[in-house]
Amino acid sequence: MDELSPKLQNQIAQFQQLQQQLQAVLTQKFQMEAQLREIERTLEELGKATDDIPIYKSVGSLLIKAKDKESVVKEIQEDKETLEIRVKTLDRQEKTLRERYQTLQDQISKALGAKQETAG
């Protein structure tokens, strides 16, 4: 790496940092998508439940009987909307990072290719 120009060394460092950022965004997105699937299954089951069945919700480490089914459904739908917004934000971040990643990868490959031509 000593024979590489400072500019190329910097680009490689940025490239590695982008890889880490992209991985972090993808991990968050994966986790939130899993939470969304869980919420959708919960809403589906609540839709099947009759109004006379007691519904409990988790509050911290406790399960508390809910006032009524509608209030729980509304709360869960709000959580779902929030998660959907977060996933869309992560999608945009992922797209931006992938574009920067590709651009930097192309620049590094070009620079390394030019370096090999001069060395050869």
Image: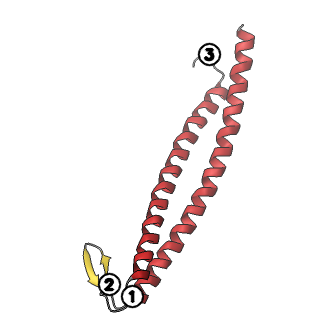
**Label 1 with label 2: CB-CB less than 8 Å:** yes
Residue tagged 1: 69
In the depicted structure, whether residue 94 falls above or below residue 115: below
Camera-side residue: 96 or 49? 49
Q: Helix or strand or loop: what does disc 1 sit on?
A: helix
- What's the CA distance linking mark 3 and mark 1? 68 Å
Side (left or right) of 47 relative to 22:
left
Where's residue 91, x and y in %? 60, 57
Q: Secondary structure at mark 2?
A: loop
Is disc 2 surrounded by few (<14), some (14 to 19) or many (20+) residues within 10 Å?
A: some
The N terminus sits in image quarter: top right
Q: Is residue 112 left or right of residue 42?
A: right
Q: Which residue is drawn at the image coordinates 70% and 14% (left, top)?
A: 116
**Amino acid type at mark 3:** Glu
Q: Residues within 10 Å of mark 1 (few under 14, many from 20)?
A: some
| Position of the C terminus by quadrant | top right
Q: Tell which tag, 2 or 3, sits nearer the viewer.
A: 2
